[in-house]
Image (cartoon, grey):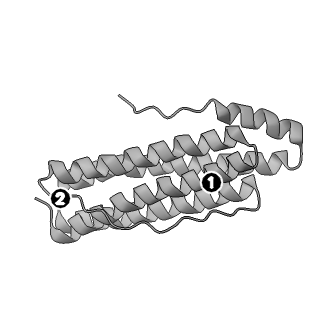
Amino acid sequence: MLNEQLLNALNRQMNHEFFAAHAYMAMASYCDYHSYEGFANFYIQQAKEERFHGQKIYDYINDRGEKAVFSQLDAPKVEFNSILETFEDGLKQEQDVTHRFYELSEIAHEQKDYATISFLNWFLDEQVEEESMFETHIDYLKRIGNDSNALYLYEKELAARKFEVEA
């Protein structure tokens, strides 16, 4: 059984993960609308990953004998000025998620809920990768600048991205 404070925080995080998927789909829509199918694919795969994260938290809550509670999702941002802006917004979103997992970890430590601490460590490791990935894409896009040939090649690379659940 989970402490009520921790359960509420896990439910909030689960919902936030599903919101993140929603936000990435909005970024994919922006990219598709502007004929950047490779970048759209990147965000579609990212949305799949966020839904996986939400499902992982859902499963954990249920495995601990509690009920996952869903809340209304806010509408995500849908207007962007550039591909670069979508990645900058993605980085901010990932940084927010990292902060949320830090807060969750603090609650788990206060409650001395070692199973949840162990569970959350996976997400903390994942967030290091997520932030690094977005920072790298931002660096590449800034380097590319207005070079349409380089952007085309970069987009083709991102078109090949596939999200696969690790074994």
Task: Name which quarter of the figure residue 26 lies in.
Answer: bottom right
Q: Amino acid at mark 1?
A: Met
Query: Relative to 64, is 96 on the left or the right?
Result: right
Q: Quadrant of the C terminus?
A: top left
Q: Which of the image's four quarters has the N terminus?
A: bottom left
Q: Alpha carbon of mark 2 to alpha carbon of mark 1: how far?
A: 31 Å
Disc 1 element: helix
At 62% from the left edge and 54% from the top edge, which residue is drawn? 27
Q: Earlier in the sequence, mark 2 or mark 1?
A: 1
Among all residues in the image, which is located at the extreme front?
A: 33
Which residue is label 1 attached to?
27
Q: Residue type at mark 2: give it.
A: Lys
Where residue 129 is drawn, which disc sits there? none
30 relative position to 112: left or right: right
x and y percentages locating residue 77 in the rendered image: 60, 65
Relative vertical location of residue 19 with respect to residue 137 in this rendering, above or below? below
Horizontally, is 46 left or right of 117 in the view? right
Q: Toward the viewer: 158 or 74? A: 74
Q: Which residue is mark 2?
A: 67
Q: Residue at x 15, y 67 (%)?
A: 3
Residue 118 visible in the shown view: no
Q: Nearer the viewer, residue 83 or 107?
A: 83
Q: Is residue 19 in sight in this rendering?
A: yes
State the residue at coordinates (46%, 43%).
49
